Amino acid sequence: MPLSSRFTIALHMLTVMDVFKEEKVTSQFMAGSIGVNPVIIRRLLSQLRTADIVTVKRGSGGASISKDPKTITYLDVYEAVAVVSEVGLFKFHEQPNPACPVGKTIHSLLDDDLLQAQLALETYLKNKTVADLLHNAQEKIIDQV
């Protein structure tokens, strides 16, 4: 089961905002590119705005990236829109059976591994910027034209 698509949708939104920055980029416009309901886009825009990643003009004013993409890491975007519980990225099943030898030890077997996996993901995301994505997008789009 995959993680929420909010992160990838948010990156798609930022790419649309950059590629079409000369146009009015509305939630409807982005939803058309992404293939989701505009309500989803508006929710994510709100989260990205709260994180100071985008600027949104009320009404049909459109959205844009609010700061230099070189300063926005994937981790910034991920933290703005992803649903990560206070206990971390991986949600553990609620009640392993304490009478079972596996059930009573599963946390001690997995907790550190899962924490290390989360830290590795966060380290990777810290080292990628939205500018990297936008540069790659421009190259790919030019190849298609």
Image (cartoon, rainbow, N blue to C red):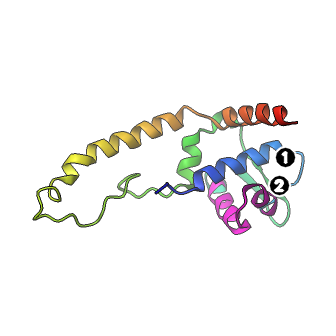
The amino acid type found where label 1 is placed reads: Phe
Reading the image, the residue beneath label 2 is 25
Examine the residues drawn in magenta and state their main secondary structure: helix
What amino acid is at disc 2? Val
Give the crowd class for mark 1: few <14, some 14-19, many >=20 residues within 10 Å: some
In the figure, is residue 138 to the left or right of 79?
right
Of the residues under marks 2 and 1, which one precedes in the sequence?
Answer: 1
Region in magenta: 28-48
Q: Nearer the viewer, residue 112 or 58?
A: 112
Residue at the location (38% across, 53% down)?
A: 90
Expressed as whole percent of the image width and height from the top left, the position of residue 118 reads 40, 43
Q: CA distance from mark 2 to mark 1?
A: 7 Å
Corner quadrant of residue 56: bottom right
Q: Is residue 103 left or right of residue 138?
A: left
Helix, strand or loop at label 1? It is loop
- Which residue is tagged 1? 20
Quick one: SS at disc 2? loop
Q: Residue at x 71, y 67 (%)?
A: 37
* Residue 86 screen position, x and y as percent: 38, 57
Residue depicted at x 21% and y 63% = 96
Instruction: Tell whether position 118 is magenta.
Output: no
Q: Is residue 97 visible?
A: yes
Q: What is the quadrant of the C terminus in the image?
A: top right
Q: Position of residue 128 (x, y in %)?
A: 58, 33
Query: Is residue 46 on the magenta stretch?
Result: yes
Q: Is residue 3 positioned above or below 116 on the image?
A: below
Are discs 2 and 1 less than 8 Å apart at CB?
yes
Residue 123, image x, y percentages? 46, 35
